[in-house]
Image: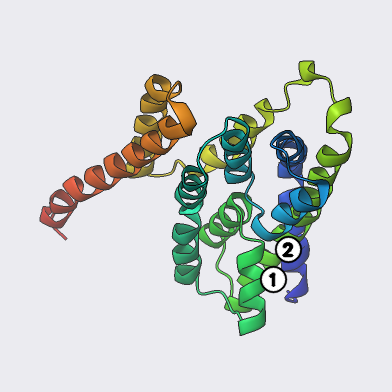
Amino acid sequence: MKPMPFFVQGSKDAMPLLLGLLPFAVLTGVSAIQAGMTPWVAQLSSLLLMSGASQIAAATLMTAGAAPLVVIVTHIAINFRYAIYSAGLSQLRLQFSPLTKLAAAQVLIDQTYALTFLRCQAQPLSAKEKTLYYFGTALPMWLVWQTGTAAGILAGPLIPAAWHLEFAITLCFISLLVPMLKNAPIVVAAAVAGLVSAFTCGWPYNLGFLFSMAAGVLAGGLYHKGRGPQRSEEPS
């Protein structure tokens, strides 16, 4: 099979996720305007960051009058997952030049990482094929994200509140989470984070989200570490 079809396959695999990504992007644009950003600044933040969770969290904090330091720390904490994604991509051994590595970092989001990870787990690919697949998933998502953000910036006031676009965020992340629940540590991390978030969702400045995320990661790590000696003692 020629390498280029893997770019096309990545784009095809991304299509179902675009339905959840579009309202998420629109809501991000609406939130930016509500936080007091000008349309140009709001769109530029989407181009430079492309991280809906942190963009909406920052906009919410700005609207609530939070201190700039709180906004910055929240941004860093939420986007720390991209460091984990980057480490995961390095293990997959994609083929990047210095220029394509910058482009890959710019378009890295939860969906592109999840699709690439799952594809590499399901099918042996060369480094070039993995890279083409990665960019194939990223291109339609980048286009939809920027278009959706612009739509939210321009038409946000016309969107009825009864549509509850914020629910798209939940659907978007659920669609990513379920295929990733393939081993016990991840299941434990997801279960603990979900349980803790149910009790901390009312904390100010979205601190409950950060706390539940940390609790989930810690629980998953401890579970994995605790099972390590048991596996090593099993006869080969």
User: Nearest the camera: 14 or 35?
Assistant: 35
- Pointer 2: what residue? 136
Query: Which amino acid, by three-letter code, is at mark 2?
Result: Gly
Of all residues, the one furthest to the top in this rendering is 162
Asked if residue 102 is positioned above or below residue 120 in the image, the reply reads below
Asked if residue 71 is positioned above or below residue 63 in the image, the reply reads below
Coordinates of residue 234 in the picture (x, y in percent): 14, 53
* Badge 1: residue crowd in 10 Å (few <14, some 14–19, many ≥20): many
Asked if residue 128 is positioned above or below residue 82 in the image, the reply reads below
Q: Would you say 25 lies left or right of 117 here?
A: right
Q: Residue at x 35, y 38 (%)?
A: 216
Residue 138: quarter of image: bottom right
User: Nearest the camera: 79 or 104?
Assistant: 79
User: How did the renderer colour the structure?
Assistant: rainbow
Residue 97 visible in the shown view:
no
Residue 101: quarter of image: bottom right
Q: Residue at x 57, y 45 (%)?
A: 54
Query: Do the residues bearing badges 2 and 1 touch, measured as CB atoms within 8 Å?
Result: yes
Coordinates of residue 143 in the picture (x, y in percent): 81, 55
* Badge 2: residue crowd in 10 Å (few <14, some 14–19, many ≥20): many
Residue 2 visible in the shown view:
yes
Label placed on residue 24: none
The kind of secondary structure element at disc 1 is helix
3D distance between C-alphas at marks 2 and 1 = 6 Å
The kind of secondary structure element at disc 2 is helix
Q: Would you say 210 lies left or right of 23 here?
A: left
Of all residues, the one furthest to the bottom in this rendering is 97
Q: Would you say 221 lies left or right of 30 here?
A: left
Q: Where is the N terminus found, in terms of image quarters?
A: bottom right
- Pointer 1: what residue? 132
